Image: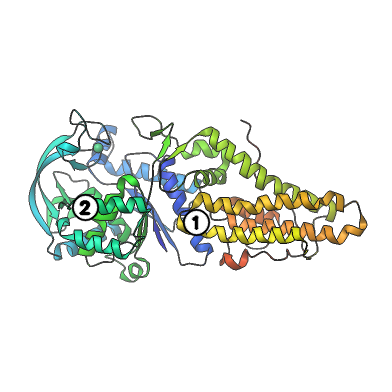
Amino acid sequence: MYITTPIYYVNDSPHIGHAYTTVVGDALARYHRLAGHDTWYLTGTDEHGLKVARAATQAGVTPQELVDTVSTQYRDVWDLLDISNDDFIRTTEARHRTGVQAFLEALNASGDVYLDRYEGLYCVSCEDYYKEEDLLEGGLCPIHKRAVEQYSEENYFFRLSAYGDALLAHIEANPDFVYPRTRRNEVVGFIKQGLEDFSISRSALDWGIPIPWDDRQVTYVWVEALMNYVTAIGYGHDDAAFDSRWPAVHLVGKDILRFHAVIWPAMLMAAGLEPPRQIAAHGWLLVGGAKMSKTALNQIAPAELVETFGVDGYRYHFLRDVSFGPDGNFSWEGMVDRYNADLANDLGNLANRVFSMVGRYRSGSVPAVQGSTESDERLRAAAAGALEALGGLARYDFPESLLGVWRLFGAANAYVEDNAPWALAKNPDDAGRLDEVLNALLEALRVGAILISPVMPAIAHRLWEQLGLPGRADTAPYTETAAFDVFPAQTVPGGDPLFPRIDT
Ligand SMILES: [Zn+2]
């Protein structure tokens, strides 16, 4: 499994929209590692282009100084959010430049690259041309709502128009190539309208990677950015590494779907490479019903939320409450409610109660015995259901999958009520049953720690330590390690509450 996020453009500081994609990718990568799959997770920063060059001039720094600063902000926020990326690519690195130039040579060798004059209306923020009819009233960019500029220059073009049939055939033969289905239909409709050739270079700009056979031109920043997915894993400099990892699953926002599902696969075909395994597109994360943007001043930095909810509370909320595909809406109140209900109550209280009963009634150690009452069967069935539900992560069913995992905690809380350990503790004849009940509850927490580990890695590990278990919760393959069995007879140290309640 080779999973990528888009590389984030350094004209913007990291906000919860960037973090949504990156947390999704991280949960996916951690899930696949937990399943025992060979997994590689890539993110990075996109650092060239006119917009960056202009922003640097405005800030009175060199482009390199600007991109160094912002790229570090991204690395820092991914550290904060416990992102387990295996690599971080920067498009200003030498390995990227080498790979891009090799890719361009391969593209050129296909015969589908040619020089032509381009005249058109250009949005500097999009770094893209627009047709007059696609602009808003007053000639404004439909995304940035700012005036476009008239450009006229010689560019190299890629003959995208020649790849429509090949793309349609590939999508037909690979039903999950574009996910979800609504996005697939959108891509098919777009291709069927007929594709236009696509400019892959810009002149009069030096903050970029030169076209290898014509140094008056630099590679168009969008084209160069797409190539990170192959240059980072060795294209043009380490063929063996590249062959072992490609093709990728690309996670993207819906606004960059066409670049990834049309232009990029066509370029790969032209360069003699396999198309991506999948392009999975999610919606926008809205704040107060509006898309986040620098100009709207409604961007939220992840650190602002982590302060209150913790890293794992943060990760859980966005996976549990935002369906992958449609737009999602962020609200502080929703985040508090979710935290208190699922984390502080269902899981946190369960762990507290179990640890305190194991301490009070059994001095921290319970014999390895299993019960066989109907109540025990129900708990075991819930654990089996939760194990099954975890597989939904691989299908982007994040809310459904977590809901399924949480049924185990619900069942364990019900099991406590059904068996009333406090009553069993009063009667010496019930000592054997009390052992069985406490053992089953510890086992439910052990299984739970494994199942939450892709989404809440730090809390999973803390719960594991509080259970006194050796090693880590995230040991593959989870289908074996998270099968409900008997909890080992050993000391259970317990510890501080996992999720202190948040007052509204
Ligand atoms: Zn624009």
Image position, residue 133 (x, y; %): 16, 37
Residue 423 in view (yes/no): yes
Image position, residue 40 (x, y; %): 42, 62
* Above or below, comparing residue 97 to residue 137 in the picture: below
Image position, residue 260 (x, y; %): 29, 53
Left-right relation of 232 to 285: left
The residue that appears at 20% across and 31% down in the rendered structure is 147
Residue at which label 2 appears:
209
The residue that appears at 16% across and 51% down in the rendered structure is 198
* Above or below, comparing residue 240 to residue 395 in the picture: below
The residue that appears at 80% across and 61% down in the rendered structure is 436
> Which label lies toward us, 1 or 2?
1
Q: Residue furthest top?
A: 138
User: In the image shown, does 453 or 426 lie closer to the viewer?
Assistant: 426
Q: What's the amino acid at mark 2?
A: Ile
Q: Earlier in the sequence, mark 1 or mark 2?
A: 2
Number of marks in the rendered image: 2
Residue at which label 1 appears:
393
Residue 496 in view (yes/no): no
Colour setup of the view: rainbow
| Spatial separation of the CA atoms under disc 1 and disc 2 | 38 Å
Q: Sort mark 1 into few (<14), some (14-19) or many (20+) by Cα contacts within 10 Å.
A: many
User: In the image shown, does 424 or 268 lie closer to the viewer?
Assistant: 424
Q: Sort mark 2 into few (<14), some (14-19) or many (20+) by Cα contacts within 10 Å.
A: many
